[in-house]
Image (cartoon, coloured by chain):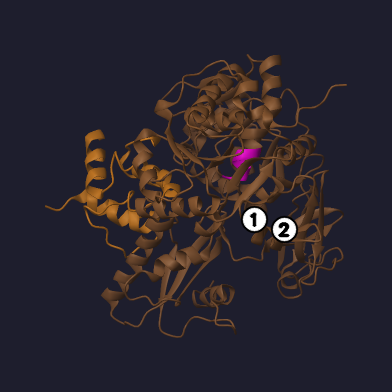
Amino acid sequence: MADEIVDQLSKLIAEKIIKQPGKVLKTDQALISSGLIDSFSLVDLALLVEDTYGVRIDDSELNADTFDTLEQLATLIRSRK
Amino acid sequence: MIVMPITFTEKLQETYRTRPDQVAIHMLLAGKPDLPLTYRELLCGAAGYARTLEKNGIQPGEVVVLIFQHSLELVYAYFGAILRGAIPSIMPFLTEKLLPERYRTDLAALVSITRPEAIFTYREFEPEVRVALSPQSSVRAVMVSEDADPPCEPDFEQLGGLSRKPEDIVLLQHSSGTTGLQKGVALSHRAVHNQLESYRRAMHLDENDVIVSWLPLYHDMGLIACFLMPILLGVPLVLLSPFEWVRAPYRLMQAVTKYKGTLTWLPNFAYNFCAQKVRERDLEGVDLSTWRAVSNCSEPMRYESQHAFYERFKPYGLKQEAFCTCYAMAENVFAVTQGGMDAPVTIDAIDRDAMQTKWEALPAVEGRPSVQMPSAGKPIDNTQVRVVNAKGHDLPERKIGELALKSDCMLSGYYHRPDITAKAFTDGWYLTGDYGYMVDGEVYVCGRKKEIIIVGGKNIYPMDLEELAMGVKGVHPGRVSAFGVFDESSGTEDVVIVAEVETKDVAERERIADEIRQAVTRGSAVALRHVHLVGPRWLIKTSSGKNSRLQNKEKYLKEMGM
């Protein structure tokens, strides 16, 4: 089943955070623990999620234990909408 | 006659006697109430650790490596080692993106060169430490904070710290990177004392000052300016975690507001980072008018970065005169120069072409490209700076050469490395490896002679990264070049890797690029900005066959149209 949030997040993260617009991120790919999104960009990710979905991620949640993949991030967003 | 205490333990003992109830550190930990720690609490906590070291047979003069996150344990263990008369050295804690195997290799490298007698860490981390140690290792004791003695009254005489003489080594500082781990800068009590006394005068420190810092303690700026200086000189310190700051940079502003902070030190990228990533709503009630000096230090400083910071926080009371600059290095304990304290930081507009091609810093001419150079200020009063050419001869004003320095607070040596210690000095002058020039007694730093890349104040050795990239299938040994490219928006360097590959297959090339990225990040905790794959014979080598990173960088920039 296509997941709109996952698709949109994948595009936005590739373009704005990793800065490789063409890159396709897999749904279950580790983003934080793999270093793909490094610690200096975590706050950008929080701002991006807030601006796009109106959902706030607290800075204490910006770690791989809270979410590491697009799927987990989408679930987190959905649970707060 | 009153004798001024020189050694750390003498200073701490005096503070304990004269003002035990003064708050030494306000520890800020996420999700917990702020923890004010008085000198009594600090030294009693440290005394427990000192006793633990003693019980484990660790003698004064022996090296203790500390592996802790930003925590009370780290603070207690550091001063515990001091009270015992042992020599503390902080090793950065494992981060989630760094491969544990890589961390082990780094730790093993540090242990083999520095030959520490003990390691102090968390129980949870003890197995990680043990696997890194060989049976012949110098380490006699691995201790865990959970087993440390509870806080107790410090018996200064008995614990061992008072047996240390001013010329004895008090601490080691390791810079990051595998290559950096092989060089522990050893500093004596007297060197640190002389630096702090001179720097105190340069900063006009007084009883109203409050230092606010989020800097890591394994680096000289965090350790000396924002940990040892306040604690040893009795200036209150507000200490945040670097891990938390990077996720919530506004906490720095809130801490300055709450504690009426007056002094902060930041690497250049932090100015951009704060200016770009702090939201309005997190600044509610923020008042930065107490900040009298925010010193830009530890990576090349940029006028544009300070300006962006000023524009962003001016509405919150930030004063323009708070902007300061500092040129520092662990080999001089910390500061070499300080600018912006007695007069605004001089901005020297110079001709760009003359700087790049003629090694001259000529005043800018209307209609030609120019560079705004912030002055790093004058040398602090115990330090002399010269600008020399390759032969070691003095250069006149506005000529660019290598910066050399001499002071009464130089390192005792690189620990257990008499070979590189001897090479670092020429006739008593320490050659810094930085290029710069002087005008009116002020120092301007232009760049580095060594090819070190500085990302967010952290030194990165390109060969470490190249080594990691060469491990990827499809990449040939010796066909990789890593370098830093300055990024205007982040105010620091981006790391780029160029690698020669044979294959023209698109999918295969993408795999190689992804694996290089992964290998470098997991092996060094450095995120790459760009992996540029090229065909055979792209890379430029020097006449002796060595990787010419500077030329490769120029070629890359040209190809990218930058």
* Chain ID, brown in image: B
B179 sits left or right of B228 in the view: left
Q: Which residue is mark 1?
A: B300
Q: Earlier in the sequence, mark 1 or mark 2?
A: 1
- x and y, in percent, of residue B289 in the image: 67, 29
- x and y, in percent, of residue B355 in the image: 74, 69
Q: Chain of mark 2?
A: B
| Numbered tag placed on residue B445 in the rendering | 2
Name, please, the residue furthest toward the left. Answer: A1
Magenta stretch?
A: B219-224
Q: Secondary structure at mark 2?
A: strand
- x and y, in percent, of residue B13 in the image: 68, 21
- x and y, in percent, of residue B394 in the image: 85, 65
- Residue B221 falls inside the magenta stretch: yes
Nearer to me, B68 or B184: B184
- In the picture, the quarter occupied by the C terminus of chain B is bottom right
Q: Secondary structure at mark 1?
A: loop
- In the picture, the quarter occupied by the N terminus of chain B is top right
Q: Quadrant of residue B459?
A: bottom right
Residue B456 visible at all: no
Q: Quadrant of residue B148?
A: top left
Q: Colour of chain A?
A: orange
Residue B399 visible at all: yes
Disc 1 residue type (three-letter): Pro
| Numbered tag placed on residue B10 in the rendering | none
Magenta highlight: main SS? helix
Q: Chain of mark 1?
A: B
